[in-house]
Structures are given as structure tokens and as C-alpha cells.
Image (cartoon, rainbow, N blue to C red):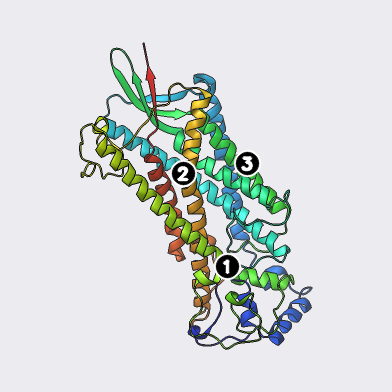
Amino acid sequence: MAASSKPTEENFHSSGLLAYDALSYRQGFDSIMSDAKFTADAKTDSSFYDRSLTSRRYALIGVACSSIFSCSCIVAGIVIVANYGTFGVFAVNLETYALREILLLREILGLTLNLIVTLCTESIGFVHGIALRSALASESRLRFNTNLRLLTAARGWYNPNGALLNGISAILLIISYNSASLAVCYDAEMQPQTDAQGIAFAGLAFLILGVVLLFQVIIALLGIRAVKILTWSSSPFDLTAALVHHTQLTPATCRCMRSVCDLDTDGGPVKPREVQPSAWDAHPSIRKVIIFLWVIVAACAGWAAFVMYIWDKDVGMHGRSPNALTPQTWSFSPGELSNFIWYILPGANPVMCILVFVNMIVVQGPLTLGLHCSELIANVTRDEKQWRRATGRKGLMTAMNPVMMIFTHPICLVLFVAKPFLRESFASNIFIGVIEHYP
């Protein structure tokens, strides 16, 4: 394989598997292919490329823990529903605490639950993503090392990695975080003599959370059973070597130094560019993801402006803080002085509960999909750095512990940590309380 010694003269993009063709001459590729076939009987797969069995072990342990957690949620939900009714809650009385302390405790519990759910969905998502990548490679449709897991599908509606089950997985992912946001809420009991307040645990929400997590586990396991996994590594180098070894990667003739931006361009070899194309130009999904994320930012800003406008105009909502912009109202934790607009759904009946659940899906669903799409940007950036490091003097050590890879790529770690905080912060903007009236 011939490669330039100057990184600035390379004309490939790290996230594209077709970059292998852009860096290879036909003769060099044929030599590699012949060597791979010649040594197929003498060498094992693990000697030619890293199958990353450690990643598989960690991923399956994560899926097993997700199954245990989902079953625990189902059991907890059934116990609460059996003792307090279908729409009942298990309430913890905290009348000796101030309202702000109770709300802060609810946020801590909600953040903890969101963190656990994030760990579960990330483990399930990794397994599902590896299965989808292998399915696309077996169909000769894998163009990039990193793809949108829920928005990219293999052929066949009934394929575990197909469009139908991927769409169901997207809905289940949204429902899982909505259920986590509804599982822990503020509880107020308005009694004739005194009022009691505390934390309420919704049994139906825990039951739904456990069921949707269990369904995601089943879909992920069906995905890896339906296709042969060549490697569990996230590195584009290991994946490229695996595809070459199993002859699933074919050369593009007369396209030397052509980048992934020139896939639909006719012509022969070209001279390398001085500046390689950006991810915006090389990966078509990157543009859609960035635009979608900015739409979410604009929608959140418009929502905040609308709430402050209504608060400032409606005297009945002012409470103790008549001004919309005060130091007390700019707190991440909701309190007695926070700005809000509210409406009451009378009665704890199925229609009202479904309405609350649908309301959460509509509001929180775009954030869940936005964070999922953000993984594409983080992973493409990770692949880009690996290619750049490989062209340096020290080179790149492809065989690496998957846990260490998280810490060597800070952007992936930041995104993982930000997910539960953003979801809990977003969920706290929708204050859901259970109010019980006693005659």
C-alpha cells in the first residue's frame, strides 16, 4: 500500500471505508488480496486482524446487566401496580423537607435513573450497531465505518437489522427515556388538616421502562445471531483488514487518490489535494445531523422565550417572583420562584395518563434522536483522529482495550456523560406532579 509521507497531501476521509481504495494502487491491492487468500489456511482470522473479543465480552456483559435491570424494573412495577392500582404510586412522605430540597432530591434520583438507563442503552446500542455494520458489509453496502444505527437499515423488512425493527428500536429508545422521566415525580397530598409532600415512584412507568429495555435487548441479540460478526472493533483499520481478509472489500479501478466525495464522479486517478475534504462534505449524514441539532437548539430557545413571555403577561402565574428574569429564576433546579406555565389533567384515568405520556414523547423525543445522531459526529471525529495518528511518525496502535479507547477519545466520553444530564435537565423543564385531594 502506497501512502504519502505528508499528511496534508492525503485525499481521503477517515470515516469512509472507500478511502482504502483511494490509497491503494491496483497492483498493491491485488498483492494484498492474493496474500490474504494464500495465507487463509495457514493463518487464523485473529492473526490477520483484531477481532476484538474483549469488546465482545464487555458488550455482552453490558447486555446481560441491561436484562437484569429491565427485569428488576418489571418486578418493581408489578409490585407497585398490584399494591396501589394501575395508576397508583409508591409515595415517600418528606413533609419535614422544604419544597426546593424535595425537588432537588427528585432530580438526583431522576439523574441516577437516567444514568443507569444510558448505560443500558449504550451497551445495547453498541451490540446493535456492530450487527448492523456487519449486515451492511455482507450486502456490500457498507460505505462508512460509522453509520446512524437507527436510521440505517439492511435489506429485508423482517431482517433483525432491517428498517422495521430499526424503527421499532428508535421508538423503544424514546419510550425508555420518557418512562425514566415519569418514574420519579413530585407528590403532594392535599388533606383537610395539613398538606403532605414527598417523592412518588410510578409503578406503571417502571413497568413500561423494563418492558421496552427488554425488547431492545431481544432485538440486539437477534441482530447478532442473524449475521456473522467479523470484528467487534470500532477501529476502521480492523474493519478494513477484516473485509479484505474475507474478500468483502473490492477495489475501485482507476480511481487512485479519489476521495469519498468523488464517488459519483467519473474520471481516472488524480493528484492529491492539499487539504482533505471535511466531514460536512464527505459524509452526507453529517450535514443532516448538524442541521437537526441546530433546529433543536432554536426550538429550546423559542420555548424558553415563550414561557417567560406568558409568565410576564399572566399575573396569576407570578407567585413570589413577578419578574421573568431574576437570579432566582435562572436556576437549573425548579423551585418556588421558577418561571413556568402549567395545566392540570383531572383524574387518574387511562386517557389522562396516555396524554401525559404522549406529551413527553413529543417534547423529549427530538432530544433523544438528536443525542443519538450526535454519536455519528463523535465517532466520525474519532475515526478521523485515528487516520491522522496512523500517518504520523509514531503510528497508531490499533489493538487497544475498549475501555481505554473511551478515555483516549474525549469527545466520546463527553457525549456519554452529557446524555443523562441533558435528558434530566430537559425532563425537569416539564414539571409533573401527582396531586391527591381528600374530601
| 85 relative to 24 in the view: left or right | left
Q: In which quarter of the image is residue 13?
A: bottom right
* SS for callout 2: helix
N-term mark: 3 or 2: 3
Reading the chain from its start, which is encountered first: label 3 or label 1?
3
Q: Quadrant location of residue 42?
A: bottom right
| Residue 367 image offset from top left, x and y in percent | 46, 49
Instruction: Identify which residue is drawn at 62% across, 45% down.
Output: 168
The amino acid beneath tag 3 is Phe
- Residue 292 in sight from this viewpoint: yes
Q: Is mark 1 on a helix, strand or loop?
A: loop
Q: In which quarter of the image is the C terminus?
A: top left
- Above or below residue 353? Residue 36 is below
> Which of the marked residues, 2 or 1, is nearer the chain's N terminus?
1
Question: The disc labelled 2 sits on which kind of residue?
Answer: Gln
Q: Where is residue 166 in the image (x, y as percent from the top left)?
A: 63, 50
Q: What residue did someone put label 2 on? A: 364
Q: Are marks 3 and 1 in contact (CB under 8 Å)?
A: no
Label 2 and label 1: CA atoms lie apart by: 32 Å
Q: In this view, does 182 lie above or below 4?
A: above
Q: What residue type is labelled 1?
A: Ser
